[in-house]
Amino acid sequence: MPLDGCPRCGYPFEREPGYFLLSIFAINYGVGAFIGLIIYLVLDFGLHLPIWLVLTLTIVPIPIFNLWFARHSKALFLAFDLFFDPHRGEDDGGDRPIESCAPPPKTPDLEPMGKP
């Protein structure tokens, strides 16, 4: 079950309908097609296997990869969106960039060495 948003800064992960279409068409299918092309070229030109075996070994893994990679392509698309169009705070007119989601730096605990 995916989270509704970032627990640290509140950046929403769910968007309007159709928001993730570009992530599915461009990122997911694009990466799947690129991997399929690489597999085909290696099997056909590198190993010189019969065409039926090359096509079987190329076509079968691509839908499995696309089902597995769909969640990651959406996360990558959200990262691109946040990088190129940073989320702005709504309480101050939207003119400040989002606070970093990185955890705050650790400060050393200052405890007395001994009791006086």
Image: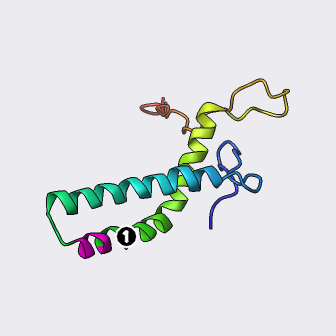
Q: Position of residue 30 (x, y in %)?
A: 47, 52
Relative vertical location of residue 37 with respect to residue 57 in this rendering, above or below: above
Relative vertical location of residue 13 with respect to residue 53 in this rendering, above or below: above
Q: Position of residue 43 (x, y in %)?
A: 21, 63
Instruction: Tell me which amino acid carries mark 1.
Output: Ile
Q: Position of residue 27 (x, y in %)?
A: 51, 50
**Residue 63 in the figure: left or right of residue 17:** left
Relative vertical location of residue 40 with respect to residue 80 in this rendering, above or below: below
**Residue 107 in the figure: left or right of residue 39:** right
- Locate the N terminus by quadrant: bottom right
Residue that appears at 53% across and 53% down: 73
What is the magenta range?
51-56
Residue that appears at 43% across and 58% down: 32
Residue 54 is one of the magenta-drawn residues: yes
Residue that appears at 53% across and 47% down: 76
Residue 74 seen from this side: no
Q: Secondary structure at mark 1?
A: helix
Q: Residue 11 or 66: which is nearer the viewer?
A: 66
